[in-house]
Structures are given as C-alpha cells and as structure tokens.
Image (cartoon, coloured by chain):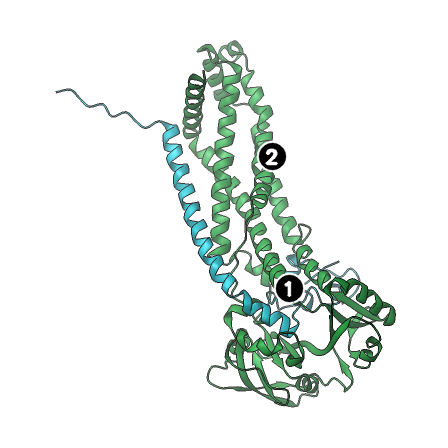
Amino acid sequence: MAQPNLEKQINILDYALSSLWRHRLKSLSVLLVFAAVIFLLASFQMVTQALSGKAKQVLVHTPEITLQKMSAGRQEAIPLAYRDKLAGIFGIRRVVPRIWGYYFDEVRLANYTVMGMAVDGMPEGNRLDTALAQGAMPGPGERGRVVVGYSITKALDLNERTTFSLFRPDLSLKPFDVGGEFSRDTDILTNDLIVMNLDDARDLFAIPAGLVTDLCVYVANPKEIDTIAKKISEALPSVRVLTRPQIQKTYQVVFGWRSGFGSICLLSALAAFVILAWDKASGLSPEERREIAILKVLGWETSDILAVRFWESVIVSGLACLVGMTAAYIHVVYFGAALFRPVLMGWSVLRPELHLFPRLAAGDILLIFAFTVIPYLAATVIPAWRSATVPADSALGG
Amino acid sequence: MARRCVEPMRPSLVFSLLLILLLAIDGALLMDGQNRRRVQDATLAQLEVATSSLGLTDLAVATEARYTRHPAASDAVAPFMDHPGAIEHFPTGAFWLPPR
C-alpha cells in the first residue's frame, strides 16, 4: 500500500519540478529574492548571536560591582573617600579604584580608550602578561610605561619606535614608552586600549587627586552581589551601582530585534513576503487555468493538484532557506560579516578584525525557518486551493 | 544493431542530487566550523585573563561613540546628550541599541 503511494508522490514531485522548470525565470527570481531575504535575516541573527555569545563567555569575569558617581544624570568622577563608607559593609573583599576614559586623537580622528589602574590589585592581575603578544605590564612604580592594543600600534605607527606622546587638557605633551602589546587574539576586548598606571592616567586627564572614574568592588561570596549592591545604594545614594549580572544582561538586549537595523531587516523581509503572497494570491493566469483544466480532464483529482502546488512551495522555500542560510554562514564566518561592517562599526577609525563564530543551535535554525518558510507555505495555501477547484469545462470553454 | 536509448534522468533525481550537493557543502562547513571552534576556544583563557585583570565591561567593536564602545558602563542619557529626543547621529546607534 505504501509503495504505490510513494510512487505517486514521486511522480507528483516530478511534475512539480517540471512545472517549476517550465517557468524557470519566474521560479528562479522568486527563489533568489526569497534566498536573499533569508540571507539577510540569518546573517543578522548569526552576527548578533556570535557577538552576544562572545560577550556572555568573557564577561563572566567582569568586576562583580562597579560604582560610578552620577550628577545631573551624567557620570562624573567619584571621590576615593567613598571607600571609607564601603568599609562598613560586610562581605566586600576589596575595592580597586580605576581611571579610564576616551582620548580623541585629532590627527587620526580616532578614539582611544585609556585605562589606568593598579593591575596587581585586580584578580588575575599577575597573569596579565599571558594576554600580551610581547613585552610586560608596567610595574607599580614605573611611570610613563604603557601596554597598547593592536589598533593603537597601527594608528600611531609604533612598529619602528616605542615612544609616543598624548596631549593633556592644557595641551602640554605627556610622553609614553610602549612596554608591551596585547595579543591579537584578545582584539575583541583590547583593540583600542592604552593601559597605564593610575598616576599616569590621572596626569593625562588632569583628574584632581582624590578622584577616580569608578570603583571596582569585589565581594567574598558571589551569591551576595545583589544584597551588597543594595547596601551600597543605601550608603551612597548618588552612586550608580552596576552589578555583574546587569552587565552580562546588557549584551543580551543590546542587539535586540528592536534595534534599528534589526527592524529594517525584519521589515524588508516582511515586505518581500507580502509581495510574494500577493503575487501568489492575485488570481490565476489563463495558462494556469487551462493547465489545471487539462489535468482534470485527464483524471487528476483536486487533492493531486493541491499536492503539486504544495510540493512547488516546499521546493522553492526549502531550497531558498538552505541556500540563504548557507550563504549567511559563509558571509559571517569567512567574510567577517562584511556587509554589516558599515553599520556595526560606523565611523569608528579603529576597527578590530572580527572573527565571528556563531554557535548555531537547533532553536536558531528553527527560528529562521519559522520566520520564512512557514509564512510562505501559509501564503500559498489559499491560492493552491483556488487553483485546484477550477472547473474543467469553464477553463477550457472560456 | 539495436539503438541504445538513453533515458533522461527523472527531475526528482536531479533535484535529489542538487540537495545532496548542498548538504555536502553544509557538512564541510560544519566540519571546518568544529576546527575553528577549537582554535577559538584555545584563546578563551587569554580573553578571561584580560577581562578579569583589567575589569573590562564591554567588547571593543564600535569605537565611535562612548555608548556603543561601552554600552554596559556609559550613562543612559549619552545617546540624547544634545537634547532630549535628539536624533541619533552615529551609524552604530542603528545596530547597538542603548541599554534600558
């Protein structure tokens, strides 16, 4: 019983494929447009998944609590004296002050991220040398020595020399000596960094003694992060308290579907579907009516014609899905999402080389499938039924 | 001498061959992906050390605006620093949604 039924379905599949081949220009254009829409959607999904996945992986080690002082809704320098107020909170292991900010290089029009701190006071600070491609971190007493990211070396053309200068706010020059360079494997975190001692950063940004940019707070028991954060908020009401879970969560929402680019992709995909569905639903051509009438005269049943239309939709949408997703994967993994770089990095002058690697789960593939193939199949159900119920005599007689 | 009649391949067979070719390409990509994953995982230790010893909070991907360079640690009004409801003028703001 199963054998004849299978044979029948294969024959119907043959007919559907021949039918698509007869209208190959139309079929191919539908397939290409559909594959392009899926390519855009899947590429977007893979880029955001790769970036948020990477953030999730590495930001597990971000400071447990970061304190920033807010004034009039903006961040400003936080007094070091606030450490005394934290001393009474039980469960805090250590507080590390940090000065960091942005240095705009007017010659190269690039933004550098300058970070000053006592690295040996941080967790794993003594192992930071393992993240360097060459050189070593400056010691606590070594003034004027810095470690830079790869893009800084490139922007300042530091291959031949090891010294450079940056302007203080009063336009006097502060000289630096490059003591090391971060490994290229850490580019996604350290690409635009200039790391130095706290005193050097204070001198460069002319931040008065007794003030820093933020305080990194480490707690004894990670389960108490929220409790300690609450106690800090009560002790220091003007301070913004950022906890590790909040920072990790940021990257899960930052590339949301609500972001502008996501909406554009989604809207273009939806527009393409509406056009496709409209095309399918907007009546049958006289040739199609005649073809169906002839099939019916030859003994085809309505269910057979429905099956032909179903197979046609499955072939077009399935093939488009496969081609679109494969092309998206190649685009993201082998070409570093080259099409999205203009929006992903914008006017940034320092650009890391992205090695994106989406960890695709079955759920991600199903999501793209559900967004694309299923609406297409649904959109073709009514036209398929309309075409299958064309009376043979009216089509031939007309 | 009897003429040999070469029967053309059935369309479903041609389609199956095309599908097998596409799936073979996907299989090759999958295997290459496994190798790349191993290489990337080997660099994870360096990234972890950099994050914990510098207290990093963000990825260095977009460096043009401070709220896309440090979405987790920049202040919430930064995208609207000129006036409330100001039109976003950095291109990366289209991709990097400010956290709420």
Q: Colour of chain A?
A: green
The cyan one among the chains is: B
Nearer the camera: disc 1 or disc 2? 1
Left or right placement of residue A207 versus residue A31 in this view: right
- Asked which secondary structure carries label 1, the reply is helix
Left or right placement of residue A236 versus residue B56 in this view: right
Label 2, on which residue?
A375
In the rendering, at what x and y percent does residue A168 appear? Answer: 67, 86
Amino acid marked by disc 1 = Leu
Do the residues indicated by labels 1 and 2 lie within the same chain of the protein?
A: yes
Q: Between disc 1 and disc 2, whose residue precedes?
A: 1
Note whether residue A282 is visible.
no
In the rendering, at what x and y percent does residue B44 appear? Answer: 54, 65
Q: Residue at x 60, y 60 (%)?
A: A57
Q: Label 1 lies in what chain?
A: A
**Outermost residue toward the left in this view:** B1
Q: Is residue B100 above or below residue A317?
A: below
Q: Are marks 1 and 2 in contact (CB under 8 Å)?
A: no
Amino acid marked by disc 2 = Pro
- Asked which secondary structure carries label 2, the reply is helix
Label 1, on which residue?
A59
Quadrant in which the C terminus of chain B is drawn = bottom right
In the rendering, at what x and y percent does residue B63 appear? Answer: 62, 68
Residue A349 lies in what quarter of the image? bottom right
Q: Label 2 lies in what chain?
A: A
Left or right placement of residue A207 versus residue A55 in this view: right
Between B93 and A337, which is closer to the camera in this rendering? A337
Q: Is residue A266 above or below residue A5?
A: below
Q: Residues within 10 Å of mark 2 (few under 14, many from 20)?
A: some
Q: Is residue B60 above or below residue A252?
A: below
Q: In the rendered structure, find residue A138 and report the number of the disc placed on it.
A: none
Q: Marks 1 and 2, Cα distance to the nearest angstrom? A: 37 Å
